[in-house]
Image: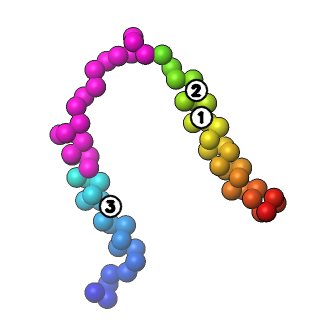
Amino acid sequence: MQRLNWEWIFYINLPIGAVAVLGAFVFVPEPRDTSLEQRPDLAGQAASAIGPLCISYALIGWTAYG
């Protein structure tokens, strides 16, 4: 017990991750190719770009504005 320290908590992720990856291969069905039926989601792409930018700006500048 003396050799265990707080850093060992990160090793629990290894078996959980391995089980999750194997479970995904077994239980998640492979999607069919619908590339001809779909269009790019421009609103989603804009939100994915602007959202993290706004959050970063808020976290960096919160001290200046209180």
Q: Nearer the viewer, mark 1 or mark 3?
A: 1
Q: Which residue is mark 2?
A: 43
Q: Who is closer to the viewer here, 1 or 27? A: 27
Residue beneath the point at 32% across and 84% down: 3
Residue beneath the point at 31% across and 18% down: 33
Mark found first going from the N terminus, 3 or 2: 3
Magenta residue span: 20-38
**Amino acid type assigned to the residue bearing label 2 in the image:** Ala
Residue farthest to the bottom? Answer: 2
Mark found first going from the N terminus, 1 or 3: 3
**Amino acid type assigned to the residue bearing label 3 in the image:** Asn
Q: Which residue is mark 3?
A: 13
Q: Nearer the viewer, mark 3 or mark 2?
A: 2
**Label 1 neighbour load within 10 Å: few <14, some 14-19, many 20+:** few
In magenta segment, residue 6:
no
Marks 1/3: CA–CA distance: 30 Å
In magenta segment, residue 35:
yes
Marks 2/1: CA–CA distance: 6 Å
SS category of the residue bearing label 3: helix
Instruction: Find residue 35 and report its horizontal and vertical position in percent.
Output: 39, 15
With respect to residue 62, does 38 lie above or below? above
Instruction: Find residue 26 and report its horizontal and vertical position in percent.
Output: 17, 40
Location of residue 63 by image quarter: bottom right
Tag shown at residue 47: 1
**Amino acid type assigned to the residue bearing label 1 in the image:** Ala
